[in-house]
Amino acid sequence: MTFGESISTCFSKYATLDGRATRSEFWWWVLFVVLASAATGLLGNVISGLFSLAVLLPGIAVTARRLHDIDRSGWWQLVGLIPLVGWIVMIVWCCQEAKEPNRFGSAAAD
């Protein structure tokens, strides 16, 4: 999945928590959010805050779908709220290969 396809997919599945997300879809989304956040931060706090609100739901949704790809419930992203350790665990999980077969459906091509 390319950068543009990933952004398009994440916005078209704005709040879709069902299904699975490939590693490339997730990490391209993360790169987009980091770059766009930096750019909007230069423009001002109000614009940056509005952008953060606009990408909050798709970020939660793509993370839930990414966790589904490794056969974990989307609720596991709450582990990320644990200082330091939670972030490390989430990064490791999001880097793992898809588990086939699993209860969340068939995997998309990475």
Image (tube, rainbow, N blue to C red):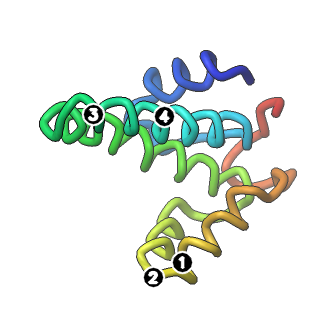
Which residue is drawn at the image coordinates 43% and 49% (left, top)?
60
| Residue on which disc 2 sits | 83
- Looking at the rendered structure, the kind of residue marked 3 is Phe
Q: Which mark is residue 29?
A: none
Q: Quadrant of residue 19?
A: top right
**Which of the two marks, 4 or 1, is nearer to us in this view?**
4
- Label 4 Cα neighbours within 10 Å, binned few <14 / some 14-19 / many ≥20: few
| Residue on which disc 4 sits | 35
- Looking at the rendered structure, the kind of residue marked 1 is Gly
CB within 8 Å, label 4 to label 2: no
- Looking at the rendered structure, the kind of residue marked 2 is Pro
CB within 8 Å, label 1 to label 2: yes
Q: How many marks?
A: 4
Please tell me which of labels 1 and 3 falls first in the chain.
Answer: 3
Local secondary structure at mark 1 = helix
> As drawn, is 61 to the left or to the right of 49?
right
| Residue on which disc 3 sits | 51
Whole-percent x, y for residue 93 in the image: 70, 64
Please tell me which of labels 3 and 2 falls first in the chain.
Answer: 3
User: Relative to 91, is 38 above or below?
Assistant: above
| Residue on which disc 1 sits | 86
Local secondary structure at mark 2 = loop
